[in-house]
Amino acid sequence: MVRKFFLLFSALLFSGYLFSQATGSKYVLLAWDVSFSMQNRELESDFKFLDNYFKRNRDLRVNLVLFANEVIENLEYQVVGGQWETLQEKLKNVVYDGATNYKSVENQISLEHNELLLFTDGAQTFGTGIPSFGIKTLIINSNPYKEQNDLNALLVASKGRLFDYGRPLFSDTASQIQSAKENDVATTSGAPQKDSVATGMGIRLEEVVVSEKRPVENPVESVNIGNGEVDKNRVGVAVQSIGDEQISPITTDVSQAIQGKFSGVQLGREEDISKVTIRSQNSMQLNNYGLVVIDGVPQEQANSSKGNSSPQPGFGFVDPENIADITVLKGMAATTRFGSLGANGVILITTKSAKFKKPGEKPVDRARLTNNVYEGDLSSGKNIPEPSYINELKGTNDVMVAYTLYLKQRMDYLASPTYFINVFEQFKLRDAVLAQRILSNIAELNAKNVPLLRILAYAYDANGEFANAFKINEQILELDERSAQAKLDLALSAEDNKKYQLAYAQLSELALNSNPIEIDFSGLNKPVTNEFHGLLNTEGANITVSESDKKYANPLRFDARILVMWSKSNAEFELQIINPDKRFFTWEHSEVGNPTEYFEGIKNDVNTEEFELIGAQKGDWYLKVNDLAEYVTVDPVYLKCIVYYNFGKADQRKEVQILELLPEGKSPSLFKVHL
């Protein structure tokens, strides 16, 4: 009886197996790459492979996943008797657009799947890491512009089998795309010719600090920066100061009071304060002498470019015993109140008779010069004509009609990230999925181009797409592990994605200037240090912090902390920082204006400058960007402005803006900061 039951049970199992085979129990994931580069696939080769495959596997279930930067469609098909015409018809009519992300395929694999058929050219252009799919994998390529090395890496990681039908016409996709871009530039209007822009007064700044005296609960060391005293630890600039106790009683003139007291301050052979040099002598034709200000009054200034013919102001009237303090101001601290005269630094002398005035009596401000008043246009640029391709897209009411129009347009703009950013802006409110796919083409077309990938990361940041920005910043660091900027960008992006331990690790490495590879991170000292303070102050409880880094836990507070970043290290431009009174101050990034910093930035890929506003005037501040390049640029340059309002305070908030660096007059290149 038992034996009969066992035979009956076995027969039922076998018949069930045959039935499952007949109805297609084998479950195959067919991942079909529909990224932009795959439009070059030889469809006949792919179909021939599938035809042979379904002759051997006549009855099965097929899970079709169309993927690019993400999964575009996920569909189910039943193949019976080797007939796959319905599936074939679907594959004939797919649209090729967007970047390639293998993680999107990996996320679709389930315990039900028996096998993966991955049709791709190997070029992952969105995201990092080679996935290990965990099931039997066949990789099929018919694209002649394949990424052979990436295909091999994918093959090893998946322990799969490769069927490569693509003719090796080029070594990689990037070569083909670059050739297409060059042809496109040659046959269209090409990159704009960038004219040089006059530097005006030629003021170069290192930081912006506008300060006023504030009441504090605990005594602090204060320093005079020309318009009030502030906490020396929170000035945010290189300020040196001495008091009357550091001036020797035997000092007979003010020059002796200064000589040897300040680093980087030289009085020359004659030991004459009128010929003080505070910064390095950058020019043989322009004046290198600093400005002397006594009790808020700028004194007559000698001129190094005129030699002995320059006026030789005297300072014999200053009694050393009457000096309360002497402060050396550099960079923005020197020019915030003294305009172009402070470009070479300022010696600020405050006398005891001026310092100890009657209560409530204010000194007369005689430093409001007339040579730094901004008279240009600060409009938002809303009336600037839009590109013709945008007007064409706006003329369509149906989103799929607009998308079809975009597919026709894009072949004329493959070399223009700006095109994809502008089109993304048009689609993001109409169809967010299509918008993301369109924008990801920047990665697909420029998979190895760090400056252009950085532009894509900027666009994601500005639109709050922090997860995508993180992926691109990971790619950039993988491409250029020597880049100081890439480490800072990844740290900031990790913070946006609440990956605080990773952000801490990147900042710690930058702050310590330590790396297995010889890189100089010192050009990012200021933004790294301040970011470190901000991170540990807000998220220190969520991070494992070393004892040596706990010094960064004390909070720094600014009305606004401003980071200006640029996509390409050798970009040449100037920033005019314009206050609500239309007074402007200039910081320059160029070979001529600041060669040492410029070439060090290129060497270490340092593309960030930080400015702070402390006790700042309320109202609208503007950062006007002027292009200084004297050559045609192949790739565009974008700038990103990150503004941390109320930095270090409970109500801190962050705002990100981006803009393309264009020739003066072509469009208003403005960042706006509202306090």
Image (cartoon, grey):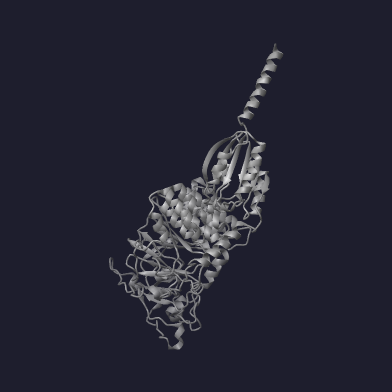
- Whole-percent x and y of residue 653? 40, 52
Q: Say whether residue 619 is left or right of residue 536.
A: left
Q: Say whether residue 113 is left or right of residue 389.
A: right
Which residue is most to the right? 3
| Closer to us: 256 or 638 | 638
Q: Tally the numbered discs.
A: 0
Judge whether residue 16 can be spotted in this image. yes
- 368 up-or-down from 404: above or below: below
Which residue is most to the top? 1
Q: Say whether residue 15 is left or right of residue 633.
A: right
- 170 up-or-down from 129: above or below: below
Quadrant where the C terminus is found in the figure: bottom left
| Closer to us: 522 or 142 | 142
Quadrant where the N terminus is found in the figure: top right
| Closer to us: 592 or 613 | 592
- Whole-percent x and y of residue 361? 28, 68
Q: Quadrant of residue 23?
A: top right
- Whole-percent x and y of residue 251? 44, 78
- Whole-percent x and y of residue 235? 43, 63
Q: Quadrant of residue 622?
A: bottom left
Judge whether residue 108 can be spotted in this image. no
* Residue occupying image coordinates x 42% and y 52%: 402
| Closer to us: 657 or 216 | 657
- 615 up-or-down from 498: above or below: below
